[in-house]
Amino acid sequence: MTPHPHPARLAAEAPAPGAEPPAARPMPPLDAWMYRDQNSGTICLTWCLVAWFQGSPPSLPELRGRVLRRWGHHERLSLTPGTPGAAPDAWPEWTPGPDFDAGHHVVASTAPDGLEARAAQLLAQPLGPARPPWQLHLLPTDEGFALLLRTHHALLDGVSAITLLRALLDAPAPAVPGPRARPAPGRADPPRLGPVRALADLLPRARPLPFHGPVDPRRAVGWSRVPLAEVSTARDALPSGRASANAVFLAATAGALRAAGATGRLPWLPGVCAMVPVDVRDGDGPVVLGNHYATVRVPLPAHDDPRRRLAAVDGFTRRAEFKRRARAQALLVASRPRKHGPLGDALGRYANSPLYSSLLCSSVATHAAGVGIGPARLVGIGGLPPLGPERALAVTMFLHDAHAVVAVVTDHGHQALAARLPSLIREEIHAMRP
């Protein structure tokens, strides 16, 4: 990358000569788990948020200045990962820096082979360990431009990335649940997970699918824009009441996998499970970035009736214990001792295996409209998550304004799935309509 001789800084002043360097602090367990997975074989825990704009793009200096003004107060964006000493099993740390180089973090990119191909390239490239692990890319498109936020998952989760994107936009968006501070100790009774549920959440439930196995180092990306009106109509397909948008997405993904022949030789048997991230931030308190979520396994039915699939998924995700299970799991993970051991490492490998979940499925709603940068209007947002060591498929749906963007990430060996599944998911959403 071409160096910039006079980079903008997010801190107004350099540290005084002889000042003590910022103190490193141990990573929370969820951050540490993903950081250690960064160089595991061909696994790259970089993920991307893509935002499409219609209209003229800002100049690179303008964008850097906007980032400096609106992201500069977030200490999280100045953290650099590392491990103390030379011990390979040492618990990783975050080291806060006094400033960072906006010339490195905010860059102009090109996409000669198209935005999907460029996103796939950036998704497969690890971020260097010497700087805070994130970059914002300004990319041209046929209708205007795109911003691609590329970050290590140890640094930011999906809700954090949405919060940062919204902070860049000109028009204020309506208040929505965002990355909020966790409750203070003693503020509320901690969520409890009974022994039966705790055991059930550890037992193998998912069935390895035909595309499972070691992933190759390259990535393939595909996406499709679905009118939000189609999602809304599908939500009214159940006689028992309006389904959630998340249930529509999960049920449509189940149908698309079935239509693509990707559920194995016996698709009617149970066992295809989606790993679904659930935000566990408190609804009150100051905005906080980082990783504040837990995952819940959701069975994906393979019935041939789209509405029957929707009813099964919606019934599972609407249970009162769904959120409680996520909160209890997050509390359990956060309470782990800050050290590595054979049991903890084995559990980490198991949770990344196809026996724990068949694929990753994540949906996020921004609940924002009419926002943009200068004369350019934000028209769509897509999420591109990392892949697991043996799970070569991740699917997301991000809802913004009048559209939902369905995105699929696979390794390069399964690029046909990335090209086909987005349109199949849209067809399944269409098929649910009453």
Image (cartoon, rainbow, N blue to C red):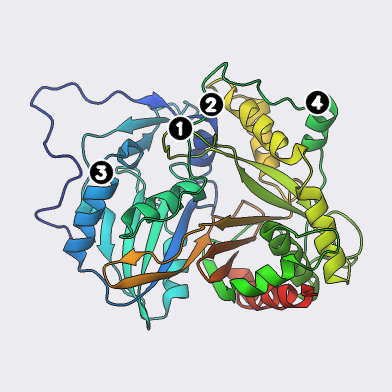
Q: Position of residue 372 (x, y in %)?
A: 34, 66
Q: Nearer the viewer, mark 4 or mark 2?
A: 2
**Camera-nearest residue between 355 and 232:** 232
Q: Which residue is mark 4?
A: 194
| Amino acid, disc 1 | Gly
Residue position for label 1 = 285
* Kind of residue sitting beneath label 4: Gly
Quadrant location of the N terminus in the rendered image? bottom left
Q: Residues within 10 Å of mark 4 (few under 14, many from 20)?
A: few
Q: Earlier in the sequence, mark 4 or mark 2?
A: 2
- The amino acid pointed to by label 2 is Pro
Q: Is residue 207 visible?
A: no
Q: Nearer the viewer, mark 3 or mark 2?
A: 2
**Residue 147, position in %: x, y?**
36, 65
Disc assigned to residue 232 = none
Q: CA distance from mark 3 to mark 2?
A: 25 Å
- Number of the front mark, 4 or 1: 1
Say which residue appears at 39% left-offset and 63% top-offset: 148
Q: Real-space Cα distance between discs 4 and 1?
A: 29 Å
Quadrant of the rendered image containing residue 394? bottom right
Whole-number angstrom distance, CA of label 3 to CA of label 1: 20 Å
Quadrant housing the C terminus: bottom right
Q: Which residue is mark 3?
A: 72
**Disc 2 from disc 1: Cα separation:** 8 Å
Q: Which residue is mark 2?
A: 183
Q: Are discs 4 and 1 less than 8 Å apart at CB?
A: no
Q: Earlier in the sequence, mark 3 or mark 2?
A: 3
Say which residue appears at 84% left-offset and 60% top-offset.
311
Q: Mark 3 or mark 4: name the one nearer the start of the chain.
A: 3
